[in-house]
Amino acid sequence: MEHSLENLKPLIRCPVCQKKYEPGKVVLLSEDDRKTALHLTCETCEISSLVFVSLGKMGAVSFGMLTDLERQEVKKFYGSEAVSPDDALEVHQFLKEFQGGIEECFSKPDTI
Protein backbone atom coordinates (compact mmCIF):
# COMPACT_ATOMS: atom_id res chain seq x y z
CA MET A 1 0.00 0.00 0.00
CA GLU A 2 2.28 2.70 -1.30
CA HIS A 3 2.08 5.96 0.69
CA SER A 4 -0.58 4.36 2.86
CA LEU A 5 0.13 6.56 5.86
CA GLU A 6 -0.64 9.70 3.89
CA ASN A 7 -3.78 8.12 2.41
CA LEU A 8 -4.98 6.80 5.75
CA LYS A 9 -4.43 9.92 7.88
CA PRO A 10 -7.85 11.48 7.21
CA LEU A 11 -9.61 8.19 7.97
CA ILE A 12 -7.92 7.10 11.17
CA ARG A 13 -9.56 8.24 14.39
CA CYS A 14 -9.27 7.15 17.99
CA PRO A 15 -11.83 4.39 18.68
CA VAL A 16 -12.50 5.86 22.14
CA CYS A 17 -12.76 9.65 21.72
CA GLN A 18 -12.95 9.89 17.89
CA LYS A 19 -10.15 12.50 17.62
CA LYS A 20 -7.79 12.32 14.65
CA TYR A 21 -4.33 10.95 15.38
CA GLU A 22 -1.34 13.24 15.31
CA PRO A 23 1.36 12.02 12.86
CA GLY A 24 3.99 11.89 15.64
CA LYS A 25 1.93 9.30 17.51
CA VAL A 26 1.69 6.85 14.59
CA VAL A 27 4.23 4.01 14.38
CA LEU A 28 4.41 2.12 11.09
CA LEU A 29 5.02 -1.51 12.06
CA SER A 30 4.92 -3.16 8.64
CA GLU A 31 3.82 -2.36 5.13
CA ASP A 32 3.70 -4.02 1.75
CA ASP A 33 1.63 -3.68 -1.43
CA ARG A 34 -1.57 -5.05 0.13
CA LYS A 35 -1.41 -4.50 3.90
CA THR A 36 -0.25 -2.11 6.59
CA ALA A 37 0.09 -2.47 10.37
CA LEU A 38 0.16 0.58 12.65
CA HIS A 39 0.45 1.38 16.36
CA LEU A 40 -1.43 4.54 17.27
CA THR A 41 -1.56 6.58 20.47
CA CYS A 42 -4.24 9.23 20.92
CA GLU A 43 -2.88 12.52 22.27
CA THR A 44 -6.26 13.42 23.73
CA CYS A 45 -7.20 10.31 25.75
CA GLU A 46 -3.79 8.53 25.59
CA ILE A 47 -5.35 5.23 24.49
CA SER A 48 -3.18 3.07 22.20
CA SER A 49 -4.40 0.72 19.50
CA LEU A 50 -3.08 -1.60 16.83
CA VAL A 51 -4.64 -1.11 13.41
CA PHE A 52 -4.32 -3.47 10.45
CA VAL A 53 -5.42 -2.28 7.00
CA SER A 54 -5.49 -4.49 3.92
CA LEU A 55 -6.56 -4.02 0.33
CA GLY A 56 -8.90 -6.56 -1.16
CA LYS A 57 -11.04 -6.84 -4.27
CA MET A 58 -13.82 -4.88 -2.57
CA GLY A 59 -11.56 -2.07 -1.28
CA ALA A 60 -9.79 -1.35 1.99
CA VAL A 61 -10.63 -3.33 5.11
CA SER A 62 -9.37 -2.40 8.56
CA PHE A 63 -9.27 -4.08 11.93
CA GLY A 64 -8.26 -2.34 15.12
CA MET A 65 -7.87 -3.33 18.74
CA LEU A 66 -6.97 -1.50 21.91
CA THR A 67 -3.61 -2.36 23.43
CA ASP A 68 -1.59 -1.54 26.51
CA LEU A 69 1.65 -1.75 24.52
CA GLU A 70 3.56 1.51 24.35
CA ARG A 71 5.57 2.70 21.32
CA GLN A 72 8.87 1.18 22.41
CA GLU A 73 7.27 -2.09 23.48
CA VAL A 74 5.45 -2.61 20.20
CA LYS A 75 8.63 -1.84 18.23
CA LYS A 76 10.44 -4.47 20.29
CA PHE A 77 7.81 -7.23 20.18
CA TYR A 78 5.95 -6.79 16.88
CA GLY A 79 6.98 -9.50 14.44
CA SER A 80 8.96 -11.44 17.02
CA GLU A 81 8.53 -15.15 17.55
CA ALA A 82 5.19 -16.12 19.09
CA VAL A 83 4.91 -18.01 22.36
CA SER A 84 4.70 -21.70 21.46
CA PRO A 85 2.57 -24.34 23.21
CA ASP A 86 5.82 -25.85 24.52
CA ASP A 87 6.78 -22.46 26.03
CA ALA A 88 3.41 -22.28 27.82
CA LEU A 89 3.76 -25.85 29.11
CA GLU A 90 7.28 -25.12 30.35
CA VAL A 91 6.07 -22.09 32.33
CA HIS A 92 3.11 -24.07 33.67
CA GLN A 93 5.39 -26.86 34.86
CA PHE A 94 7.81 -24.38 36.44
CA LEU A 95 5.01 -22.64 38.36
CA LYS A 96 3.48 -25.95 39.41
CA GLU A 97 6.76 -27.07 40.98
CA PHE A 98 7.95 -23.67 42.27
CA GLN A 99 8.02 -23.45 46.08
CA GLY A 100 9.02 -19.80 46.63
CA GLY A 101 7.11 -16.53 46.73
CA ILE A 102 6.28 -14.30 43.79
CA GLU A 103 9.29 -12.04 44.50
CA GLU A 104 11.66 -14.98 44.12
CA CYS A 105 9.97 -16.09 40.94
CA PHE A 106 10.85 -12.83 39.18
CA SER A 107 14.11 -11.90 40.90
CA LYS A 108 17.40 -12.03 39.04
CA PRO A 109 19.84 -14.76 40.09
CA ASP A 110 22.88 -13.70 42.10
CA THR A 111 25.92 -13.05 39.93
CA ILE A 112 28.85 -13.90 42.26
Image (cartoon, rainbow, N blue to C red):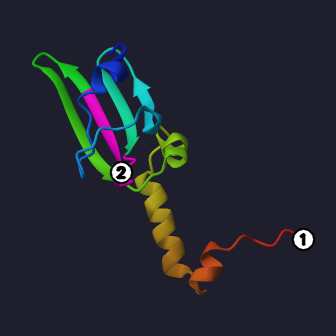
Q: Secondary structure at mark 2?
A: loop
Viewer-closest of 7 and 90: 7
Label 1 CA crowd tier, 10 Å (few <14, some 14–19, many 20+): few
Query: Quick check: 65 left or right of 79?
Result: left
CA separation, marks 1 and 2? 48 Å
Vertical side of 86 occupied by 14: above or below = above
- Disc 1 + disc 2, Cβ < 8 Å: no
The residue carrying mark 2 is 44
Which circle marks residue 84 in the picture?
none
Percent x, y for residue 83? 45, 51
Of the image marks 1 and 2, the number of the one nearer the N terminus: 2
Q: Residue at x 29, y 18 (%)?
A: 34
Instruction: Please tell me in which quadrant of the rendered image residue 26 appears.
Output: top left
Q: Residue at x 26, y 34 (%)?
A: 12
- The residue under label 2 is which amino acid type? Thr
Q: Where is residue 71? Give x, y as percent.
A: 50, 45
Question: Hey, which residue is sitting farthest left in the picture?
Answer: 58
> What residue is at 44 percent from the left and 30 percent from the top?
28
Residue drawn at x 18%, y 28% as measured from the top left: 61
Identify the element where label 1 is drawn.
Answer: loop
Image-quadrant location for residue 54: top left
Q: Nearer the viewer, residue 93 or 110?
A: 110
- Which residue lies under the disc numbered 1? 112
